[in-house]
Image (cartoon, helix red, strand yellow):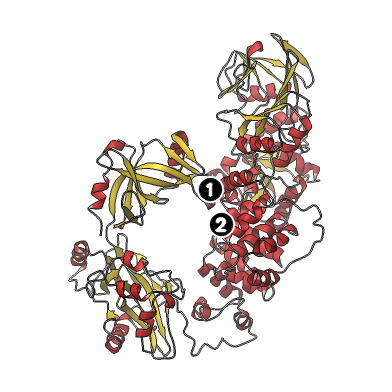
C-alpha cells in the first residue's frame, strides 16, 4: 500500500503535489499553497502564493495579512506545472472547497473538511468522481449521527421561550458554525436580534458583505444587560465559562457542536444545553460519500481515521490512513 | 413512562447545580405515577439490581449488530459502554409504533428474564426506542447512573417533593424496598408512617469530616483510635442479628461467627477487625479482613484463620430504647454497661486515648505505626448520634501518608467525564538490576491543569500501544502518596499500595533518581 512514489505525497504537515510544486493546506509556510477553506488548521499565514476561493481569500485576509492570493471560483480550473487544478464546493463553511487535481489521466480529490446536509450560509457539497479520494474523518465513528438540524434548532428556541428571564448563550466556532446557527434560526422564522461576542462580529459582517443574510445582529458590548433577557447570544466556545459571560443576564450555556452527541463531552464543557450541530459529515454521511464518489482508493487525513479505514476494508474498498498533524477540531 | 425517565436523566446530566438537580428530581417524583417513580428513585439511590442482566450482556448484544472493531474504537472514544451502545445502535426504520413503555413494565421484564434471554429482551426494547431512551434503558438495566446524584441527594429530593424532614426518610429508608409504594403513600398523606417493629434494619451512620488544619480543645472533644477495618452496624432484635456495612449493605453472611455471637437486643456501631496470625494478638491489617469480605459463604478454615471480632465505638439502641438524642458522654456510659454482657472474644470496646491536650494527642498519633491504626477520631463530647456528616461534631485525623517517587510506565484513558484524557497511570520503581517494576496505579490527586499536562505528556511520549493502554517513555517522575504497603503475589514487584494517589508531579526529578522497590519493601506492614 505504500504510495511513496505517487505524485501526491502525504506529509505530516500537509499534502505535497509534486508535479505542481504546491502544498494542500500546509501547516507551515510554503511558497505555493492550495487552501481548501479558512479554518486555522487548514489556512495559515506566511505563504508565498495562495490559491483559494474568493470567499476563503477574504476570510484569510481578515485573519492574516495574506500574501499574493489567486481567487479561484468554484468550477474554474487552472494549471500548475502539468497538473490541472479546480475547486468545487465542499459544503463545510462559506468558501470551502474540495480540490480536484488531474495529472496524467489520474484524478485526485482532496476534500479538506465537508458536510452533506444543507446549510443556509454556504454552497452544498458536490460529488466529484475520482480515482483517489482524500477525505477527512472528524466524526469517523458510528456513534456520530447528527440529528436533523431542525430538531436542534427547536431545542434552542424552546429553551429561549421557557426562560424569558435568562439569555441563551450559544458557544459556536467563530468561522462557519456561528453564522450557520444564525442562518438556521432565521430559516426557522426567528427574527429577533441576535447578540454577538466581539470575536464573532467581524466574521459575521464579512459573511454579510459576501451576500449571506444574517438578519438583525448586534454587539453584546453595546447592549444593556437587561435587554438580553429572553434573547439569544452567540460567543466562541472559549467564552462560555469565561468572566466575559458575567455581563449577560443569567446565561444558560449552550454549545453547537458535533461532539455534543457524547454526553460526557458536553459535561466536560459545562454545557447545559447541548446542540448537536456539526459542519462535518457524520458517520453515515462519510460512508455514503465514499460510496457516492466510489474512488478506487480512499485516503483518510484526520480525525478517527482508523475506524473509517476499517469500514472501507469491511466493504472491500481500498483505503489508507495518512498521518497528519495538528488538525483536531475540538470546537466543531 | 420511559420517556419521562430518560428526559430526567438527560436533564440531570446537564444540570450542574445541586438545587437544580433537586428541583428536577422532586418535580419528577411528584408528577410521575406509581410504580414508575419508585423504580426511578431506586435507580437513583443505587438500590436497583438485575442479577441476570450484566454489562457483558449489553456488550454482546451490541456485537450482534455492530462490527467489533468499530465498537471497540467507539467505546474507547465515548468512555462508557452503555452510552456507546445507545448511540451506535442502528435505528430501526420500522420503528413507527410510538409505543410508550412504562418503567414498571421494563423493570418487571428485566427482573424476570434469564441470563441467556437478557440480551434478546434488551435488544427488543432497544428496537422500539430512540437513542435517549436506549441510554436510559441501559443505565437502568446495568446500574450506575453517573448523573452526579448521590443516594442522599435523591432522598433529599423526595423529602422536598413531599415537604418532609430528610431525617424521617433516612430513618425508614433501609427497612423499605423498591418501588417504595408505602413511602409515597406516606409522603402524599394517604397512609401513616410504615410500621417497622421487629424488622432488623440499618440506620445511617454518623460520619466524620477530615480534621485538616483545625486544632481542637480536648475539653470539648474525646479521642480514640481510628481502626483500619470495616465500619459496621450490628442490629439485634432478639430473634435475628444482622451486620450492615457503611453503605447499608447486609454483610451478615460473610461474618456468621460474629452475628451468632451477638446475643443482645440493640443497635451498636463498631469496627470489624480480624486477629492476625498470632491469634488473640493485636488486630491484623485490613488485608487479612479482605480475605473474608465479599464472600457469600465462609469456610470453617477461613473462620479459624481469620477470626473476626468487633471493636465497639457507639450504641444507638439499647433494647428498644433510642439513645441517639443523648450526648456522646451519656451514650458512652450506656455502651460501657452494654459491652460486658457480650462474648469478650468477639466484642470489645474501643479505648479512649488519654491526651492531656491537642499537642499531646498529636504525639500519640505520630507514635502509632500499628498496621491496624489508620489515625485518630475526635468526637464532640456533647454530640448526639446524627446520620451523615455534620460539621463540628466528629473529625477523623489520619496518619500522615507515606510517599515514594515513582516513574510513570503506562497510561489509560479514564472513564466518564475524563474519557478524553489519559488519567489512569501505572507507575513503577527500580530494581537493583536497573529495571522498572510496576508498584501501583493511581487516577487521582492531581488538579485539572495537571491532568491536562500529564495527558499531553502521554500523547507525546507514547512508545507502544496495547489496546487502550499506552506505554510511555520512562521519564515522568510522580510522587505517590499511599496509606500503607502490603505484600502481594499478584504483582511482579511483590507488593501493593493501599490508596495510592499522585501527590506531586516531579518534573524536576530525573527518572533515574526515583525510589527503589527495596525501599517500598521496607515499608510493608
Specify the quadrant that holds the N terminus of chain B: bottom right
State how far apart marks 1 and 2 are (Cα): 19 Å
The answer to whether residue A224 is left or right of residue A214 is left
Secondary structure found at label 1: loop
Question: Above or below — where is B56 with respect to B290?
Answer: above
Q: Quadrant of residue B407?
A: top left
Residue A161 x %, y %: 73, 55
Q: Residue at x 62, y 87 (%)?
A: B191
The answer to whether residue B298 is left or right of residue B373 is right
Classify mark 1: residues with Cα within 10 Å, few (<14), some (14-19) or many (20+): many
Secondary structure found at label 2: loop
Question: Above or below — where is B52 with respect to B519?
Answer: below
The answer to whether residue A35 is left or right of residue A191 is left
Q: Evaluate whether residue B296 shows in this view.
A: yes
The mark closer to the camera, 1 or 2, is: 1
Which residue does the numbered mark 1 point to in the structure image?
Answer: B419
- The extreme top residue here reads A81
Q: Nearer the viewer, residue B61 or B389?
A: B61
Classify mark 2: residues with Cα within 10 Å, few (<14), some (14-19) or many (20+): some
Q: Nearer the viewer, residue A258 or B212?
A: A258
Q: Same chain for the residues at labels 1 and 2, yes or no?
A: yes
Q: Residue at x 71, y 9 (%)?
A: A82
Q: Quadrant of residue B234?
A: bottom left
Q: How many numbered marks have been drawn onto this rendered protein structure?
A: 2
Specify the quadrant that holds the C terminus of chain B: bottom left
Q: Which chain is disc 2 placed on?
A: B
Q: Residue at x 64, y 40 (%)?
A: A172
Q: Quadrant of residue A140?
A: top right
Q: Which chain is disc 1 placed on?
A: B
Which residue does the numbered mark 2 point to in the structure image?
Answer: B16
Amino acid at each position: 500500500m505504500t504510495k511513496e512514489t505517487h505524485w501526491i505525497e502525504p506529509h505530516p504537515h500537509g499534502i505535497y503535489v509534486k508535479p505542481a510544486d504546491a502544498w494542500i493546506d500546509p501547516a507551515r509556510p510554503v511558497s505555493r499553497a492550495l487552501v481548501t477553506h479558512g479554518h486555522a488548521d487548514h489556512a495559515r499565514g506566511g505563504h508565498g502564493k495562495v490559491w483559494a476561493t474568493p470567499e476563503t481569500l477574504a476570510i484569510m485576509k481578515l485573519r492574516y495579512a495574506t500574501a499574493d492570493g489567486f481567487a479561484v471560483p468554484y468550477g474554474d480550473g487552472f494549471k500548475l506545472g502539468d497538473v490541472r487544478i479546480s475547486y468545487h464546493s465542499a459544503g463545510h463553511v462559506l468558501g470551502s472547497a474540495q480540490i480536484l487535481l488531474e495529472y496524467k489521466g489520474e484524478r485526485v480529490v482532496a476534500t479538506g473538511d465537508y458536510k452533506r446536509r444543507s446549510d443556509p450560509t454556504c454552497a452544498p457539497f458536490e460529488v466529484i468522481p475520482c480515482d483517489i479520494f482524500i477525505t477527512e474523518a472528524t466524526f469517523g465513528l458510528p456513534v456520530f449521527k447528527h440529528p436533523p438540524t431542525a430538531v436542534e434548532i427547536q431545542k434552542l428556541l424552546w429553551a429561549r421561550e421557557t426562560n424569558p428571564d435568562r439569555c441563551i448563550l450559544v458557544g459556536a466556532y467563530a468561522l462557519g458554525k456561528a453564522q450557520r446557527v444564525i442562518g438556521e434560526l432565521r430559516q426557522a422564522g426567528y427574527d429577533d436580534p441576535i447578540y454577538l461576542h466581539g470575536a464573532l462580529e467581524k466574521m459575521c459582517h464579512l459573511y454579510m458583505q459576501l451576500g449571506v443574510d444574517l438578519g438583525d445582529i448586534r454587539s453584546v458590548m453595546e447592549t444593556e444587560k437587561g435587554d438580553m433577557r429572553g434573547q439569544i447570544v452567540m460567543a466562541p466556545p472559549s467564552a462560555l465559562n469565561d468572566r466575559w459571560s458575567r455581563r449577560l443576564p443569567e446565561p444558560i450555556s449552550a454549545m453547537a457542536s458535533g461532539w455534543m452527541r457524547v454526553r460526557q463531552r458536553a459535561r466536560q464543557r459545562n454545557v447545559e444545553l447541548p446542540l448537536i450541530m456539526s459542519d462535518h459529515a457524520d458517520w453515515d454521511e462519510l460512508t455514503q460519500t465514499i460510496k457516492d464518489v466510489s474512488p478506487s482508493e480512499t485516503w483518510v487525513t484526520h480525525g478517527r481515521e482508523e475506524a473509517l479505514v476499517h469500514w472501507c476494508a469491511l466493504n472491500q474498498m481500498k483505503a489508507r490512513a495518512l498521518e497528519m498533524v495538528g488538525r483536531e477540531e475540538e470546537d466543531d | 413512562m420511559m420517556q419521562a425517565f430518560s428526559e430526567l436523566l438527560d436533564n440531570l446530566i446537564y444540570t450542574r447545580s445541586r438545587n437544580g438537580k433537586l428541583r428536577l428530581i422532586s418535580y419528577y417524583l411528584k408528577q410521575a405515577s406509581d410504580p414508575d417513580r419508585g423504580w426511578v428513585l431506586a435507580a437513583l439511590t443505587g438500590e436497583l439490581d438485575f442479577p441476570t442482566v450484566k454489562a457483558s450482556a449489553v456488550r454482546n448484544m451490541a456485537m450482534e449488530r455492530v462490527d467489533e472493531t468499530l465498537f471497540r474504537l467507539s467505546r474507547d472514544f465515548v468512555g462508557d459502554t452503555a452510552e456507546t451502545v445507545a448511540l451506535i445502535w442502528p435505528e430501526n426504520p420500522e420503528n413507527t409504533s410510538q409505543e410508550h413503555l412504562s418503567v414498571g413494565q421494563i423493570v418487571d421484564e428485566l427482573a424476570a428474564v434469564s441470563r441467556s434471554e437478557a440480551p434478546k429482551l434488551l435488544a427488543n426494547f432497544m428496537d422500539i426506542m430512540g437513542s435517549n431512551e436506549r441510554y436510559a434503558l441501559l443505565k437502568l438495566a446495568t446500574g450506575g447512573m453517573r448523573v452526579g446524584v448521590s443516594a442522599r441527594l435523591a432522598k433529599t429530593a423526595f423529602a422536598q417533593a413531599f415537604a418532609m424532614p430528610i431525617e424521617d426518610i433516612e430513618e425508614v429508608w433501609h427497612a423499605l424496598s423498591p418501588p417504595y409504594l408505602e413511602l409515597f403513600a406516606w409522603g402524599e398523606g394517604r397512609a401513616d408512617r410504615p410500621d417497622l417493629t421487629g424488622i432488623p434494619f440499618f440506620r445511617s451512620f454518623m460520619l466524620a469530616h477530615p480534621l485538616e488544619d483545625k486544632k481542637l480543645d480536648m475539653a470539648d472533644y474525646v479521642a480514640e483510635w481510628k481502626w483500619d477495618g470495616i465500619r459496621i452496624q450490628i442490629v439485634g432484635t432478639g430473634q435475628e442479628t444482622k451486620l450492615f456495612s457503611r453503605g447499608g449493605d447486609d454483610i451478615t453472611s460473610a461474618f456468621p461467627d460474629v452475628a451468632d455471637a451477638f446475643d443482645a437486643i440493640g443497635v451498636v456501631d463498631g469496627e470489624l477487625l480480624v486477629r492476625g496470625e498470632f491469634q488473640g494478638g493485636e488486630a491484623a491489617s485490613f488485608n487479612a479482613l479482605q480475605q473474608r469480605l465479599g464472600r457469600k459463604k465462609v469456610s470453617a478454615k477461613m473462620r479459624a484463620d481469620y477470626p473476626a471480632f468487633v471493636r465497639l465505638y457507639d450504641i444507638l439502641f439499647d433494647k428498644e430504647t433510642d439513645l441517639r438524642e443523648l450526648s456522646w458522654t451519656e451514650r458512652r456510659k450506656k455502651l460501657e454497661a452494654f459491652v460486658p454482657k457480650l462474648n469478650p472474644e468477639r466484642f470489645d470496646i474501643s479505648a479512649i486515648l488519654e491526651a492531656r491536650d491537642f499537642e499531646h494527642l498529636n504525639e500519640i498519633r505520630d507514635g502509632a505505626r500499628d498496621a491496624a491504626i489508620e489515625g485518630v477520631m475526635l468526637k464532640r463530647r456533647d454530640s448526639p448520634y446524627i446520620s451523615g456528616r455534620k460539621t463540628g461534631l466528629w473529625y477523623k485525623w489520619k496518619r500522615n501518608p507515606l510517599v515514594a517517587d515513582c516513574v510513570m510506565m503506562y497510561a489509560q484513558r479514564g472513564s466518564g467525564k475524563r474519557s478524553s484524557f489519559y488519567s489512569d497511570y501505572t507507575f513503577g520503581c527500580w530494581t537493583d538490576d536497573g529495571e522498572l517494576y510496576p508498584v501501583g496505579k493511581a487516577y487521582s490527586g492531581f488538579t485539572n491543569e495537571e491532568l491536562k499536562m500529564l495527558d499531553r505528556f502521554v500523547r507525546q511520549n507514547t512508545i507502544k500501544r496495547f489496546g487502550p493502554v499506552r506505554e510511555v517513555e520512562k521519564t515522568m517522575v510522580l510522587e505517590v502518596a499511599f496509606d500503607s504497603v502490603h505484600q502481594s503475589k499478584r504483582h511482579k514487584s511483590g507488593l501493593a499500595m493501599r490508596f495510592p494517589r499522585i501527590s506531586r508531579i516531579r518534573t524536576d526529578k530525573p527518572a533515574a533518581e526515583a525510589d527503589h522497590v527495596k525501599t517500598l519493601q521496607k515499608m510493608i506492614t
